[in-house]
Image (spheres, rainbow, N blue to C red):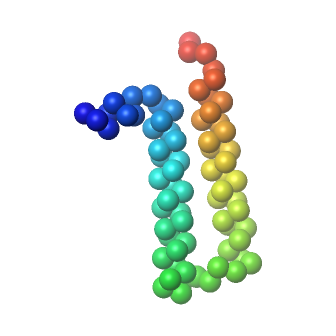
């Protein structure tokens, strides 16, 4: 029951999901770089910047949702 108590609010769950998505993305890029399936060069930079911009907006929207009054 420990993990259920930790995630009793939706806000913590959404932050955990966002963190997990970032972890999977970084792990995927690292594995591709290690296996030399993708070279981190100027072609991959817009994808990485776009992903982190998307995640920034995701975290901002989750934070703003927490400020809204319950209906």
Query: Is 70 displayed left or right of 42 in the figure?
Result: left
Q: Give residue 54's position: percent from left, percent from top.
A: 66, 51
The answer to whether residue 18 is above or below residue 8 is below
Residue drawn at point x = 51 percent, y = 32 percent: 11
Query: Is 30 displayed left or right of 54 in the figure?
Result: left
Residue drawn at point x = 50 percent, y = 70 percent: 28
Q: Give residue 69's position: percent from left, percent from top.
A: 61, 16
Q: Residue furthest left?
A: 1
The answer to whether residue 67 is above or below residue 56 is above
Tell me where residue 22 sits by quadrant: bottom right
Q: Residue furthest bottom?
A: 36
Q: Give residue 33's position: percent from left, percent from top.
A: 55, 81
The answer to whether residue 56 is above or below residue 33 is above
Q: Give residue 48's position: percent from left, percent from top.
A: 66, 65
Q: Dividing the image into 4 quarters, which one contains the N terminus? A: top left
Residue drawn at point x = 48 percent, y = 76 percent: 31
Q: Dividing the image into 4 quarters, which one contains the C terminus? A: top right
Query: Is 51 displayed left or right of 11 in the figure?
Result: right
Residue drawn at point x = 51 percent, y = 50 percent: 19
Q: Count up the numbered dots.
A: 0
């Amino acid at each position: 029951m420990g993990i259920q108590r930790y995630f009793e609010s939706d806000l913590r769950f959404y932050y955990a999901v966002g963190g997990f998505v970032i972890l999977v993305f970084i792990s995927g890029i690292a594995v591709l770089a290690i296996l030399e399936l993708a070279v981190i060069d100027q072609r991959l930079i817009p994808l990485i910047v776009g992903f982190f911009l998307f995640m920034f907006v995701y975290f901002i929207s989750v934070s703003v949702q927490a400020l809204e009054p319950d209906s």
